Image (cartoon, rainbow, N blue to C red):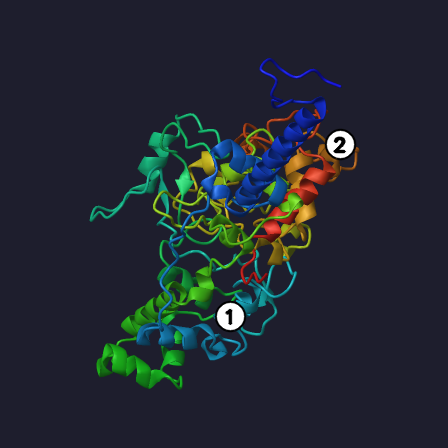
Amino acid sequence: MRPLPAGGEPGPVITRRSWLRLLAWSAAGLVLVLAALSAYALVYPARMPPAVGEIVENITGANPHPVQLMRPQNAPLSAVALLGKQIFFDPTLSASGMQSCASCHSPQHSYAPDNAFPVQLGGAHMTQTGYRPPPSLAYLYRQAPFSIGPDQGDTDVPVDMTQLATQAAGMQRAQKTALAAPAAAAMVPQGGLFWDGRADTLQNQALGPLTNPVEMANATEEDVARKLLQTKYLDQFKQIFGPSIVSNPSLLVSEAMFAVGRYQIEDQSFHAFTSKYDYWLEGKTRLTHAELHGLQLFNDKDKANCAGCHLSQPSRDGLPPVFTDTQYEALGVPRNPAIPANKDPKYFDMGVCGPFRDDLAKQTQYCGMFLTPTLRNVAERKVFFHNGVYHDLKQVMDFYNLRNTEPAKIYPRDASGKVQKYNDLPPQYQANIDSADAPFDRKFGDQPAMTDQDIQDIIAFMKTLSDGYKE
């Protein structure tokens, strides 16, 4: 029996068992607090410190830094845009009577072709072949006019492209680094429409196929005007532009193309911003581990470095990313023997310096450069690059990964067995091809920048850029 403490009265005795019980209760309380904090962090990662938010992002795929995206206003189409919609879908405006704008720019296929042909059939009898795959018309509403160097903005003075190109010729090319703004304004071609930027406005772009002999094949704009005068929507022209429009063929065609441009600007389907990635940016959904890892690689300047050209971050004022810097690059993709024009060994499509634009033909530092397209809805496309040489994203990613490290897997061999690297650009212009930006900064025999699993994860991420996402 324990002795009584001084004074003869029993006092509190802290036994080892009591200590253990107290510690157990304290630990249980701490666990409950940590569990509550963890649960709160999982549900509300944006309210956590950045380091905690990143941990939660890697565990759950939630965006710890959600933003509010400023999408274009969704409103009923104006009368002009409604007229433009009818023109867009009207095959009677073609020489064959079988081809409309929508024939090569299908709304069900993100306003790109609905087939896997590298070039489309057209012409007066639908037997002529084109030279390039039609690019998507989606996400062009923010495209600036073609320029060399910074956007020239509003000016009444005509821009001399040759003079600008000459001034820029001696400047070192800026390196493309994911998630990093260039130190100086890029003095390279940027903006414009078509693969070579030869159209500055949606209005001018719409007119091009109408008078192209291998597309809608009208011989002149007057032919287009005569067809417009026979349409069932001619009265809408009169109501919008006045009765005299029918007696002015040039103005009739101009206003028709303006209407097509308005349709593309006003109709939300051309820039829906309804992809999983958009909702993830807003904190409304979560990425899978593969998608999140793919995004991290996409943004990794030493790995895929995709975001160096395909900008992935919202603007400071909340505009959603359109996944292009709208600049021009010479990538050196292999020649596509499936294009009929390429059967002529002397024929080369050199983009900015020809053959479909001639104002910069003498600026040979741009030969082989083509517009960087948006990657939105890229997983829905069936042909890739300006010559449609590839048909799936795995082939595209293998090109980026192996072009320099294992070129024999990318290019054909000649009769002697030598690999014909950069075989779709004349040798005198091959110095224009990008070999500075990752992953092209690797040399022959180096370890490729990405593993096969990395590539699969990047593709998983790119699939999150398709519009129409539903959980």
Nearest to viewer (mark 1 / mark 2): 1
At 30% from the left edge and 80% from the top edge, which residue is drawn? Answer: 237
- Distance from Cα at disc 1 to Cα at disc 2: 43 Å
Residue on which disc 1 sits: 102
In the rendered image, residue 281, in percent from the top left (x then y), is placed at 48, 48
Q: Secondary structure at mark 1?
A: helix
**Placement of the C terminus among the 4 image quadrants:** bottom right
Q: Is residue 163 above or below residue 17?
A: below
In the rendered image, residue 35, in percent from the top left (x then y), is placed at 60, 40
Mark on residue 418? 2
Q: Is residue 283 above or below residue 103?
A: above
Q: Nearer the viewer, residue 112 or 320?
A: 320
Q: Secondary structure at mark 2?
A: loop
Left or right, residue 380 beside residue 182: right
Left or right, residue 156 beside residue 199: left
Q: Is residue 53 above or below residue 13?
A: below
Left or right, residue 224 beside residue 6: left
Left or right, residue 42 beside residue 415: left
At 47% from the left edge and 79% from the top edge, which residue is drawn? Answer: 92
Any part of residue 200 in sight = yes
Q: Nearer the viewer, residue 25 or 224?
A: 25
